[in-house]
Structure formats: structure tokens, C-alpha cells
Amino acid sequence: MSTIEKVNGHAPDTSHAESWARAGIADAEAERVRALTAAEIEERRIKAEAEAEAIRITAHEEAEKLRLANERAALRFKREEAEQLAKIADANRKREEAERLAAAERQAAEEAAQAKAAAEKASEAASGLWRNVALGFYALCAAVALPVQMAAFYKPDAKYLLVAPVFIEVIALVALVGAAAAVTAGRPHWHYRLVAWAGALTAATINVVHGLEAFDPATAFGTALASIAGPGMWDLHEHGRIRQRDGKPTWRQRWQKHRAEVKASRQEAAEKERARAEKEAAEKAATEAAQKLAAQRAELFPQVWKHAVKLAADVGETTVTQAIWVQAKLDVEGAKPGESADVIRTRNAAQRRVLAARSEAPGEKPVKAASPQHAIQVKTPRGASSYKPTPPRRTKGDTPKFHRVARSLAAEAKRQSITSTTTEQES
């Protein structure tokens, strides 16, 4: 009896029992709901704590990533800054190096210009000195040569003829001055120099003739030399200017050039001679090698050599070339150089012996050569026929025919098998 029944002192009726049962069920359901709600609350709390922890961890990770990213960015910035500073330093160094080189080039150019100016100044000074000395020497020579000439033209009743020797000397002087002007202007000068030398030679002739008649030979030839030496020295001065203007080489330069040309021609001749000797030696060696090869072929392959000689004569060749030899080898032995029937048989027999020797190793199954007449389209029966009472008979055409190449290969394999068997028996 339940507690409710004990309290009331009598058994409850059916309607009260059902009410109490429903109330118990409701209480149990409410308790279940309360327990479920508490579990859900706990679950949600745990879930919220887990989510909060995950958010905290994620935030921490994001903060760590951000910190690392900031550090990497800072390091990258420092590296880029260092690279930029290095580039700037390198650019400054290159600029300073370029400026230093440019300054050195400018200084070298200035020094070269100064040296050139100094050389030109020294050359002008030397040329001016040489010009003045030549003029002074010309005046001295004229002073030495004029007395004899004036004595030659002196006549008491025609004293005006004393102007003639002065005129002759002045002709030479004026012509040489004209030649100097022509040289400076780049004009032709040979006719001025020709007139000057004509005047000088005329004065020298007068000095020689009159000096020998009126004076002694020393006076005659000395004054004649003076008549030539003065214009000659001046002409030498102008000759040097002409060669400098035209860029003509000196005698030493011409001689050095001639020696260089002779040396180059000798070296070229020696090189040609060496090349010719090497070519002759190579041709001689090739000829000897060809003769030796021909002798060996004639000795080792007499039949092939005879046919090769006939074939060479037939095609119009004077020697047995490699192409003719290959053709002769094919015609006589049916194989190219390096191959023959004997060589092929020997190679096949050697391969079979090696195969047999390998099969004799311990633990190895002996190798048996396959039949040369084996064909894949003709299958070997696995056992007795299942047809009862009698197996079917084979008829003509029930198996594809062998190809003509296969028939040739099978015949060759059979021939090689017979040959190898005979060789092994003989050995």
C-alpha cells in the first residue's frame, strides 16, 4: 500500500490513483526536464568555456602571428634599408671612382696637352733658331761669294754691272722665300726651289771660272761653295718643313719599315714551306697506309681483292676505294666488311657455348635450345582429345600459312642448328 493510502486510512479509488499516477509521471517528467536542462546548461557552459578558450587560443595565436609578422616586417625593413644603404654606398663608391678616373684622365690630358704645347714650343723655338741661323749663314755665304763675283763683273767704264752679282744672289733669296711661303700655304714649291738652285749654281759657276782666272783655286772653289752652301742650308730647312707637312717618313723609318716587310715576307715564306712539308708528309703517310692496307686485303682476302680490282676498273677508278671494297665484299661474301658466314657461325656457336656454360651453374636448370621450327600459331595439344569416339582430323588450310620471311628465318635457324651440332660433334 502506498503512503497516500496509509495517510488516508482507506484505499483510494481508481480516479485518484490515476491522478496520482499522472502527477508522478508529471513530476518525473519535470525532474527529467530539470536534469536535462541542467545537463544542457552544463554542456553549454562547457561549450562556452571551450569556445572562449578556443577564442583565447586563437587570439593568442593571432597575436603571436601578428608579432612574428611585425618582427619579420621589421627585419625585412632593416634588410631593405641595409641593402639600400649598401647600394647607395656602392653608387657613391662608383661615382667617386668615376670622378677619380675622370680627374686622372683630365690631369693626364692636361699633362699631355702641356707636354705637347711644350714640345711644340720647343720645336718652334728650335725651328726659329734654325731659321735664323740659316738666314745668318746665307748672309755670311753671300758676303763671302759676292766679292769674287763683283770682281768678275767689274769694268771701269761699266761700274753698273756690279749690280749683277747682287741680282743673282737676290734671285736665289727671293725664290727661297717664295718656296717657304708655298710650303706654309700648302701650295706647290718645286719651281721656287728650282729657280733658287739655278741662281745658286750660276753664282758658283761665276766664282769658279773667275776665281781660277784671277785668283787661286782655293778662292775659286771656296767662294763657289759659299754660293751653294747658303741657299743649300736654307733649302734643307724648307725640306724638313715639307716632309713634316706631307707626313713623309724619315730614312730611318723607311729602313725599319723595309726590314719589317722583309722579315714578314721571310716568315710567310717559312710558314708556306712548313705547310707544304706537312702536307707532303701527310700525303706520303696516307699513301703508305693505303698501300699497306691494299697489301693486307690482297693477302687476307684474295678472292674479294681480285673482284674489287675488277670492279674498280669497271667503274673507272684507279684504286680500290672503300665504297668499291664494301661492294666487292657484298658481292663475294654476301656481307659487309667485318662480317662473313664463318664469322656469323663462330659467333653463334660461341653464344650457344656461353649459354650452356651458364646453365651448368649449381642450382640452375639446364637450358635447352628452342626448336628452330617452332611456330606460335601451331599450338601443341595439352593432352588427349575430349572428342569421342574419335578426334577431328586436320584439314588443309585450317592453320594460317607461314609468311615467306618466317619460312626463310626458320630455314636459316634449322641450317644454323645443324651446323652448330656438327661443329660441337667435331670439337
Image (tube, rainbow, N blue to C red):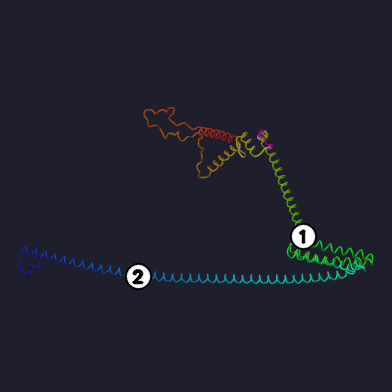
Q: Is residue 23 above or below residue 335?
A: below
For disc 2, the neighbor class at 10 Å (few under 14, some 14 to 19, many from 20) is few
Amino acid type of disc 2? Ala
Q: Is residue 415 above or below residue 90?
A: above
Magenta region: 314-319
Q: Is residue 427 something that shows in the picture?
A: no
Q: Please tell me whether the stretch drawn in magenta is mainly helix, strand or loop.
A: loop
Instruction: Tell me how far mark 1 sits from mark 2, CA to CA.
Output: 95 Å
Q: Is residue 318 magenta?
A: yes
Q: Position of residue 292 (x, y in %)?
A: 70, 41
| Residue at 75%, 54% in the rendered image | 265
Q: Is residue 87 magenta?
A: no
Q: Nearer the viewer, residue 297 or 213?
A: 213
Residue occupied by mark 2: 59
Q: Position of residue 329 (x, y in %)?
A: 63, 36
Amino acid type of disc 1? Arg
First in sequence: mark 1 vs mark 2: 2
Residue occupied by mark 1: 254
Quarter occupied by residue 380: top left
Local SS, label 1: helix
